[in-house]
Image (cartoon, helix red, strand yellow):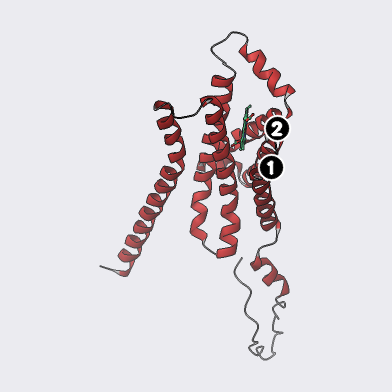
Amino acid sequence: MTGRGEGEGGRADRRWAGRIAQAAVVAAALVPAALIVADLLRDNLGANPIEEITHRTGDWTIRLLLGALAVTPVRRLTGWNGIIRFRRTIGLLAFTYASLHFLTWVVLDQGLFLQGDALGYVLEDVAKRPYITVGFTAFVLLVPLAVTSTRGWVRRLGRRWTSLHRVVYVAAALGSLHYLWLVKGEQLTPVWYALVLVVLLSVRLRPPLTASVRRISPPRRVPLPGSAPPAATPVAAPPPP
Ligand code: HEM
């Protein structure tokens, strides 16, 4: 086999390994949804199954949103570039749980499609209860991000895609606020999620290490015509952009 052939084989192996890892992430993230269905079928969701489903889907929405936001900081801190391929998958899984969470509330809790005037109640609840308004806004913000997550949209939007997808931080902040707002009594879980979000945001806002290395590197000296070539210096060359 030629060296070139081996290279292609290695790339194909890596592609397969990547696909298997993606499938494993999707399968693992769908386990909580499968457990909800299993518990529902076995009548094992407690006294208020709708509330239980709302809580479980809400929990997984915020966890996966934070998971998607953790990808870039983990990549920066560890240098593991391969992790980036999971960002879109985890983001779409977060959106899946957000949709289930929203549908549970809108269909099962509020009875939309079952009662004629339910749409009125839904809109009234969205407008009247601040934590619902905030959660609903977070969900609405996630919709265009999910729609434009395909390669085609990345190409079509170019640089604007990155700006648009920064909205995910706003959605996560609103999701976190929604949780902080709705808890009754002393519950630390939403506070922990909010703290994780603040840490992720601060890591994200910090300039990457490579940028600071580039800033402190001395400028390259351009040799004057006819002068001797500059002596080698112990300073490392700036990293490639
Ligand atoms: C990104 C969007 C959202 C996130 C991250 C989110 C997250 C959460 C979380 C973590 C909980 C609490 C779960 C628990 O107590 O264990 C929750 C509860 C809840 N959410 Fe959301 N949510 C979102 C959107 C929405 C939307 C769009 C609605 C409805 C319009 C909604 C309605 C509710 C309701 C009714 C509860 C239960 C409140 C209660 O226990 O009294 N959420 N959500």
- For the point 56% across and 53% down, the residue is 71
Q: Is residue 159 left or right of residue 23?
A: right
For disc 1, the marked residue is 173
For disc 2, the marked residue is 134
Q: Position of residue 41 (x, y in %)?
A: 40, 26
- For the point 38% across and 58% down, the residue is 14
- Which picture quadrant has residue 28? top left
Quadrant of the frame with the N terminus: bottom left
Q: Secondary structure at mark 2?
A: helix
- For the point 41% across and 43% down, the residue is 27
- Vertically, is 37 above or below 69? above
Q: Quadrant of ligand 1?
A: top right
- Mark closer to the chain start, 1 or 2: 2
Q: Is residue 64 left or right of residue 39?
A: right
Which residue extends farthest left? 1
Q: Secondary structure at mark 1?
A: helix
* Residue 186: numbered disc: none
Crowd around label 1: few <14 · some 14–19 · many ≥20 (10 Å): many
Quadrant of the frame with the C terminus: bottom right
The kind of residue tagged 2 is Val
- For the point 55% across and 20% down, the residue is 107
Crowd around label 2: few <14 · some 14–19 · many ≥20 (10 Å): many
